[in-house]
Image (spheres, rainbow, N blue to C red):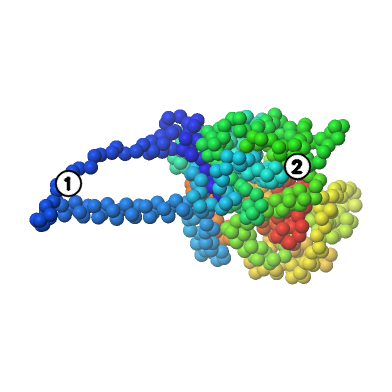
């Protein structure tokens, strides 16, 4: 696994003296030297019995040698294994399952890995060229930016500098280039280990600790498999991109860097075809012809934001195909999450439906009612094939049947379901029919249906288990999700599988001491949804699009959908 590294000087370049001391800089002073004491010359003729003092000294020397060898052995072991993030053993199943503490070591603040893959090691070649970018916002914005960076670095034949993934509820939002770079460089938790043990009140008082528990960092390769990508291009993991780091690790001066400083989120787009001077960019203020960047002599091409599925407008078949492989490589492959997701899939009987519903905040909260109804229609009409008239009757019966109004007077129109053109361009083979057992609610002895099963032959298909992946705090009592729960009696949520998710309880990030489970739940939720027979998502959600376009299709062996 690649290492996120920085030398001591680079990490402390902007630190106060007190922080520098906390980070261990004082330990670099060499111990004072002492002149060796002169030993008495021994006679070659006489061999007197060693004195008590000499015996003690001999024993002491032996002990010191043994201790030195042991220390070197232990240090060598730690040095060669500290960057490994081994998948811990997981116990799934019964209530007696044990979740032992598993500290996953991510040494973001160390020097380069002493024995990395060739694709992750600085070559030492002063002519090697690099590409850097500035990630921001939530995970999926970072993922899209990472995909674009991988494509650009490959097309420009440059080594990509890869920052870690920032997870949690305290993202770094977009800012113009210089501000965003400063925010990223100052986001390290180095020297803040004491924050872990502070109370919430103390955390508020200690300003440097505010938000400490709200975010964490993991390497990309802990979540996804980049082995195939690294066979074709070189990646170099890095913790920060300060001038000091670039100079000390890559021996770069300011004149070795070409900055493409954006001043707005939609400043630069990139195309692989020559544009007409009269052709306006679809979305971006400036469109850069990718081959025009290739001749630049600077060793580092430093970009700002690369978020945006349409930021790279590719027409050449080879480039388009390469981006598809990049996007498919973003499928979650973490062994811990995979084991739990597979176990829950089996518990659901193997065949089930899924809905990925975002309600949490902003645009999704504002449009929640319309988005939920649209997803419900996609599931009942689009996935299960119920006729429009039957779905309208079902909607009226469920949501107006307990009123005194005449059902014939209730006017409902089906929502407009927009055609998914990108998905239609890559049709997948027909899905196997749902098993008849799913309609009886007896797909698994572990599945508990919370509502009465449908007995009408027309509606028995609604007895199919439904897994809802959502950010709602209490999904079973969430009014916005009531139409799913009432329609599908076997509706379940991740919270119904606590004995399986307990396998993640012991995961701890060795970098900052935080429990990893809360940061991984959205990924696990999505992985279970993507293993369903069919899944629907939330309009305008990049997360839902990723679940449907990449995860679901990859898990089922289909070609992924590319957008942008």
On the image, the x and y values in percent for residue 405 come to 85, 49
Q: Residues within 10 Å of mark 1 (few under 14, many from 20)?
A: few
On the image, the x and y values in percent for residue 534 come to 76, 59
Q: Residue at x 57, y 35 (%)?
A: 252
Along the line of sight, the residue nearer the viewer: 239 or 173 = 239
Question: In the drawing, what numbered circle is on residue 228?
Answer: none
Mark found first going from the N terminus, 1 or 2: 1
Q: Residues within 10 Å of mark 2 (few under 14, many from 20)?
A: many
Task: Name the quadrant containing residue 449.
Answer: bottom right
Residue 267 in view (yes/no): yes
On the image, the x and y values in percent for residue 3 come to 54, 47
Q: Residue at x 43, y 52 (%)?
A: 78
Asked whether the residues under the numbered discs 1 and 2 touch, taking CB atoms below 8 Å apart as contact, a structural biologist would say no
> Image check: 483 left or right of 252?
right
3D distance between C-alphas at marks 1 and 2: 75 Å
On the image, the x and y values in percent for residue 354 come to 72, 57
> Which residue has dot 1 on it?
39
> Which residue has dot 2 on it?
312
Task: Name the quadrant containing residue 335.
Answer: bottom right
Q: Nearer the viewer, mark 1 or mark 2?
A: 1
Q: Secondary structure at mark 1?
A: loop
Above or below 261: residue 486: below
Along the line of sight, the residue nearer the viewer: 228 or 295 = 295
Along the line of sight, the residue nearer the viewer: 330 or 342 = 330
Above or below 333: residue 191: above
Along the line of sight, the residue nearer the viewer: 526 or 218 = 218
Q: Residue at x 41, y 34 (%)?
A: 21
> Image check: 357 left or right of 161?
right
């Amino acid at each position: 696994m690649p290492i996120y590294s920085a030398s001591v000087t680079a990490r402390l370049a902007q630190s106060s003296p007190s922080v520098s001391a906390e980070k261990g800089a004082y330990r670099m002073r060499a111990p004072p030297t002492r002149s060796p004491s002169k030993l008495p010359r021994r006679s070659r003729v006489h061999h007197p019995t060693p004195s008590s003092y000499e015996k003690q000294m001999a024993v002491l020397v032996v002990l010191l040698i043994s201790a030195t060898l042991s220390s070197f052995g232990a240090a060598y072991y730690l040095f060669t294994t500290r960057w490994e993030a081994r998948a811990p053993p997981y116990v799934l199943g019964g209530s007696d399952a044990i979740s032992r503490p598993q500290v996953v070591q991510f040494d973001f603040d160390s020097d380069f890995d002493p024995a990395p893959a060739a694709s992750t090691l600085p070559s030492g070649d002063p002519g090697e060229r690099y590409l850097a970018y500035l990630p921001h916002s939530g995970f999926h914005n970072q993922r899209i930016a990472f995909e674009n960076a991988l494509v650009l670095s490959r097309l420009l034949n440059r080594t990509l500098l890869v920052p870690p993934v920032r997870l949690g509820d305290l993202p770094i939002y977009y800012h113009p280039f210089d501000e965003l770079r400063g925010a990223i460089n100052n986001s390290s938790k180095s020297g803040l280990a004491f924050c872990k043990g502070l109370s919430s009140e103390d955390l508020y008082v200690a300003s440097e600790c505010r938000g400490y528990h709200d975010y964490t960092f993991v390497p990309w390769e802990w979540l996804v498999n980049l082995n195939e990508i690294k066979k074709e291009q070189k990646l170099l993991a890095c913790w920060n991109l300060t001038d000091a780091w670039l100079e000390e690790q890559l021996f770069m001066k300011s004149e070795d860097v070409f900055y493409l400083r954006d001043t707005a989120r939609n400043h630069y787009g990139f195309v692989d075809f020559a544009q007409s001077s009269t052709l306006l960019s679809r979305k971006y203020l400036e469109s850069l012809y990718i081959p025009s960047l290739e001749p630049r002599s600077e060793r580092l091409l430093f970009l700002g934001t690369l978020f945006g599925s349409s930021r790279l407008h590719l027409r050449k078949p080879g480039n388009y195909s390469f981006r598809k492989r990049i996007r498919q490589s973003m499928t979650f492959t973490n062994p811990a999450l995979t084991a739990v997701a597979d176990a829950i899939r089996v518990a659901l009987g193997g065949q089930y439906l899924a809905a990925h519903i975002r309600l949490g905040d902003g645009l999704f909260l504002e449009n929640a009612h319309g988005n939920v109804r649209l997803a419900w229609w996609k599931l009942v009409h689009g996935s299960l094939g119920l006729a429009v008239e039957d779905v309208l009757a079902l909607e009226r019966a469920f949501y107006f049947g307990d009123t005194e109004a005449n059902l014939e007077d209730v006017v409902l129109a089906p929502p407009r379901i927009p055609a998914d053109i990108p998905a239609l361009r890559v049709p997948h083979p027909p899905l196997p029919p749902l098993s008849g057992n799913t309609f009886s609610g007896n797909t698994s002895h572990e599945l508990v249906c919370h509502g009465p099963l449908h007995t009408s032959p027309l509606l028995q298909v609604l007895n199919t288990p439904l897994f809802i992946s959502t950010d709602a705090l209490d999904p079973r009592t969430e009014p916005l999700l009531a139409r799913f729960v009432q329609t599908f009696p076997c509706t379940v949520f991740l919270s119904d599988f606590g004995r399986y998710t307990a396998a993640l309880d012991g995961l701890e990030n060795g970098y900052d001491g935080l429990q990893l489970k809360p940061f991984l739940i959205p990924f696990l939720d999505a992985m279970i949804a993507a293993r369903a027979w069919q899944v629907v998502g939330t309009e305008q959600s990049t997360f839902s699009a990723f679940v449907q376009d990449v995860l679901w299709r990859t898990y089922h062996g289909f070609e992924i959908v590319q957008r942008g």
